[in-house]
Image: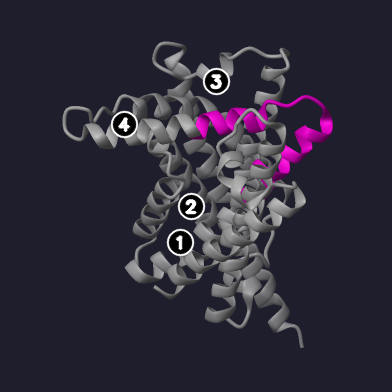
Amino acid sequence: MFSLMIILASWLVFQLLSILSGALIFDVGLKDIQTVMNDYENPVSIAYQKYIQSIISTGMFIIGPLIIAMALSSDIRKYLKINFYPGHTVTFLVCLLMVLSLPMNNFFTYLNNLIDLNEVFPSAQEYMEDMEVRAEGLFERFLSVSGIWPLLVNIFVVAVVPAVGEEVLFRGVLQNIFIRWTKNTFLGVLITSLAFALLHFQFLSVLPRFVLGMVLGYIFVWTRSLWMPIIAHFVNNAFAVVYYYFMYNGSLGDRLENMGKPYNDPAYAFLSAVIILILLFVIRIIMKDKKSQIRSEKISEDLIP
């Protein structure tokens, strides 16, 4: 409850701060803020919303969790597990894993879109569809840019800030809390992944985000380093930003976007899932060997007179 209160307070404070400071920076009148926020065609509006998203994400996902970590531990680096780097081999495998997970993610996105609540909760279905359309529209406007500088800005806003912030919050803080709370690693990862999926408020893509959360959760558990899910999250988001950039500028088609869906190369989804499981298993084996090596080196040091 303490952690939730800190996160909620951070969200409220930094939302207000970002809206007001952004209004000054982008010369938006206070009475025009709501209009500008809903204008997806005006470049100034898009820049204003990117600024707001960056500030809110920094406050809610980085500042808030750091406050929680400071309150719960005297050693923040050790508590968040940012005091250990597993090495370049594990990092490469994590990056490869995220790139090759695309067909699997596409398949789960397809399954998610099959859920239809119109007969049971029509108003809920309408709300979810409206939220998804708004999110997709804003996402497309964010990423519909030309030039290296706008691309780098998008990578920072969409990939760097969420990768660091969301992993510090969900894996660094909440997953540790839920694992200690339930006394069960699987349940802790499961609850954290569900929260990770739901708190994006895009309910027609909950399933692929939940699966992504499970993958990131076990990467964190088995590597014992927050740097690994941060890098994995960054690769996932940055890949989408760069891919959309080239697709928007006419250099790529939409084949990758549909790869793994049942109507287009469904075998790729199965192959992707198998490869992901194999890579996770390999990472776990490497980390077990590394842990044994570190323990042996420590024992040897202790025995030296």
Q: Could you tell me the amino acid type at mark 1?
A: Gln
Q: Which residue is mark 4?
A: 126
Q: Which residue is mark 3?
A: 257
Query: Any magenta on residue 161?
Result: yes
Kindly indicate the quadrant of the structure image that contains residue 207: top left
Q: Residues within 10 Å of mark 4 (few under 14, many from 20)?
A: some
In this view, the residue in front, 173 or 147, is: 147
Query: Any magenta on residue 297?
Result: no
Q: Could you tell me the amino acid type at mark 3?
A: Glu
Front label number (2 vs 3):
3
Q: Residues within 10 Å of mark 2 (few under 14, many from 20)?
A: many
Residue at (45, 71) in percent of width and height: 5
In the rendered image, the vertical position of residue 304 relative to residue 20, given as above or below: below
In this view, the residue in front, 92 or 130, is: 130
Residue 35 image position (x, y, % from top left): 57, 40
Residue 175, labelled with which disc?
1
Quadrant including the C terminus: bottom right
Image side of residue 201 versus residue 248, left or right: left
**How far apart are the two marked residues, 4 and 3, measured between alpha carbons?**
25 Å
Q: Residues within 10 Å of mark 1 (few under 14, many from 20)?
A: many
**How far apart are the two marked residues, 1 and 2, measured between alpha carbons?**
8 Å
Q: Which residue is mark 2?
A: 217
Give, as a single range, the part of the protein colored magenta: 135-163
Front label number (4 vs 3):
4
In the rendered image, the vertical position of residue 160 relative to residue 121, given as above or below: below
Q: Secondary structure at mark 4?
A: helix
